[in-house]
Image: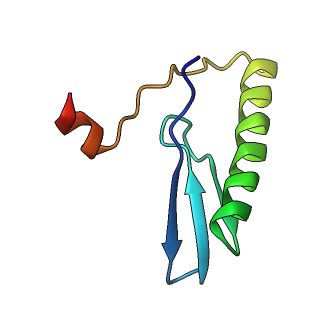
Amino acid sequence: MKDYHINIFYSEDDQGYIADIPDLTYCSAFGENPEEALTEVIKAKTAWLESAMKNAIPIPEPKYKPAIYQAAS
């Protein structure tokens, strides 16, 4: 099964980790460590998808590929 790519990075401004899902607009989360950021963005993804289904908003297919994978293709 294909799933959405998740980016996790450290933010100096926020003094913590940010996780985001590029294919789902504005779907991101904060954590004190990478594991917490991942846990929180998975919750955000679930809420994002549930809201989209409830409001008949189209759900995008997973398409995002980091540049490193694009170069290898």
Looking at the rendered image, the quarter that the C terminus falls into is: top left
Residue at (20, 34) in percent of width and height: 72
Q: Position of residue 27 (x, y in %)?
A: 62, 46
Query: Hey, which quadrant is residue 17 in on the image?
Result: bottom right
Query: Hey, which quadrant is residue 49 in on the image?
Result: top right
Q: Position of residue 29 (x, y in %)?
A: 67, 58
In the image, residue 42 sits, relative to residue 40, either above or below, namely above
Q: Position of residue 53 (x, y in %)?
A: 76, 19
Query: Hey, which quadrant is residue 59 in on the image?
Result: top right
Left or right of residue 64, residue 19 in this image: right
Residue at (78, 30) in percent of width and height: 51
Residue at (51, 73) in percent of width and height: 10
Q: Position of residue 21 (x, y in %)?
A: 55, 43
Display colour scheme: rainbow
Looking at the rendered image, the quarter that the N terminus falls into is: top right
Number of numbered discs present? 0
In the image, residue 68 sits, relative to residue 29, either above or below, namely above
Q: Which sits in the foreground, 47 or 62?
A: 62
Residue at (67, 54) in percent of width and height: 38
Q: Which sits in the foreground, 28 or 33?
A: 33
Left or right of residue 40, residue 20 in this image: left
Left or right of residue 45, residue 60 in this image: left
